[in-house]
Amino acid sequence: MTSAGVPTPPRAVLVTGASRGIGAAIARAFAERGDRVALHYGSSEEKAELVRASLSGEGHITVQADLTNAMDIKTAIDTAAERLGRLDVLVNNAGVFLSHPPLEASYDEWQSAWMQTIATNLTGAANATFCAIPHLRAAGGGAVVNVSSRGAFRGEPTCPAYGASKAGMNAFGQSMALALAPHGISVSTVAPGFVETEMAREVLDGPDGDAVRAQSPFGRVAHPEEVAAAVVWLASPEARFSTGTIVDVNGASYLRS
């Protein structure tokens, strides 16, 4: 529903990295409001299909792409738009977090982590956005929402490539907000802190779990659905004039001016 109480028509939404965690929650949130969703996955086809089968409504699909492969990305974007009939929203959620502490990693490990992280988290999102632009324009405008991280602001000492990739995503999103606003396309970003996902489970269940939860005055980490709610709002017509915004979803665990 719009703020005026008028129903908004179903949209076609592509979510990258939608086979689990935050991406799966984002897909569910869009489906619950009546949108049709294309769930991207890299290698977890079975998990992506399980998420697809769990979505409300009908017409949802899955698409595969290696986000480090430029042609894979273009094929996935074009396929999603063709099978959904259009593309109104792109959510760049997929990402990798590869540990490479600078005082412990070998030079080969350091190089590999940087190459894979930047290629997936930043270049992959940039390529997906570029390939989505013609479809978004054909739909009369739309939204791109990037999922970044508080690590872009506070740093990631054991995974500096991750922090750098997310800082790059923030800057990329703001550049695209300026470039695409004249075409009716908003570009915004969500920057979560720790989120209760399968990927974070080892840390949250380990000896550092209590300390991580204590970073927020709420005494917990975010639920994936809380990140999804911010993404859905930023993709809405009501949020169009908030283009270029970076929304923190970290429970005040990190405050920036």
Image (tube, grey):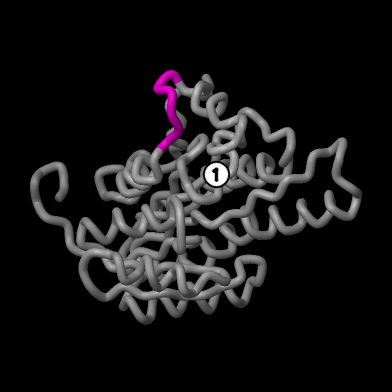
Q: Magenta includes 219?
A: yes
Residue 31: % across, % down: 26, 61
Q: Quadrant of residue 202?
A: top right
What residue is disc 1 on? 200
Does 39 sit left or right of 253 as displayed?
left
Q: Amino acid at mark 1?
A: Ala
Q: Residue furthest right?
A: 107
Residue 62 to residue 3: above or below: below
Magenta residues span: 217-222
Residue 5: % across, % down: 8, 46
Query: Could you tell me which secondary element the residue under label 1 belongs to?
Result: loop
Q: Residue at x 91, y 49 (%)?
A: 107
Query: Main structural element of the magenta stretch: helix, strand or loop?
Result: loop
Res. 52 in view: yes
Q: How many marks?
A: 1
Does 90 sit left or right of 103 as displayed?
left
Q: Magenta includes 144?
A: no
